[in-house]
Amino acid sequence: MKLALTVFFVLLTLALVSCKPLSTKVTSQDCRAAAPANFTRIYIGTPAHRGHGAGTSFDDPLDGTTAEKFDTILRSIAEGQNPTWGAQRNIASENVIVCLDSGTFQTEGQYDWTTGVGHSQGSSRGFTLGKNW
């Protein structure tokens, strides 16, 4: 009886501990310290409840919840479209710090990339990295 009671309390303790939420922020120093001069920092993750998708912090990241959304953000920057994402305007294709929130992100990778040619025109699938990313 004593052994059964001990096992019960051990299992109960393990069950309660497993309910404790883990920290959702695994943050690189590049995403915490001041951004270097001439660099743009964007944050991508799951939209915050009542957030605006400003992309300026993990508390209000750009929406990267699907491969299409994730790739579109990064591809538009890498291709030199100087897009506006959230509160960031005219984002240059070089010197970008991309901060990803904890979690799993989907991408179509380099999907239609051809060496020496670049991406196919008219497609928004996949992305490649820019200089100093």
Image (cartoon, rainbow, N blue to C red):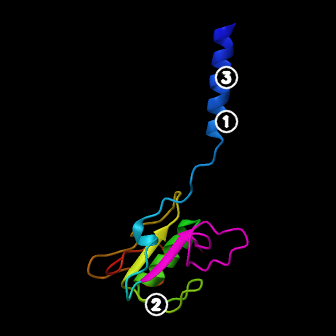
Which numbered disc, 3 or 2, marks the residue closer to the eye?
Answer: 3
* First to last magenta residue range: 40-64
Inspect the image, locate mark 1, and give the three-letter code of the amino acid beneath it. Leu
Mark 3 vs 1, N-terminal side:
3
- Can residue 61 be seen at all in this image of the molecule? yes
Residue 95's place in the image compared with 60, above or below, is below
First-in-chain label (3 vs 2): 3
* Of the two numbered discs 2 and 1 in the rendering, the one whose residue sits closer to the viewer: 1
Q: Secondary structure at mark 3?
A: helix
Disc 2 versus disc 1: distance between alpha carbons?
50 Å
**Residue 9 marker:** 3
Question: Residue 75: x percent and y percent?
Answer: 45, 79
Numbered tag placed on residue 16 in the rendering: 1
**Label 3 crowding class (10 Å Cα cut-off): few <14, some 14-19, many 20+?**
few
Look at label 3 and name its amino acid.
Phe
- Residue at the image position 56 percent from the left and 78 percent from the top: 55
Does residue 126 appear in this view?
A: no
Measuring from the top left, give residue 82's x and y in whole percent.
Answer: 47, 91
Magenta part, dominant SS? loop
Vertical order, 106 against 57 (above or below): above
Instruction: Give the class, few, some or many, for how many residues have Cα within 10 Å of label 2's Cα (few <14, many ≥20).
Output: few
Q: Which mark is residue 81?
A: 2
Q: Residue at x 62, y 24 (%)?
A: 10
Distance from Cα at disc 3 to Cα at disc 1: 10 Å
68 drawn magenta: no
Nearest to the observer: residue 50 or residue 9: 9
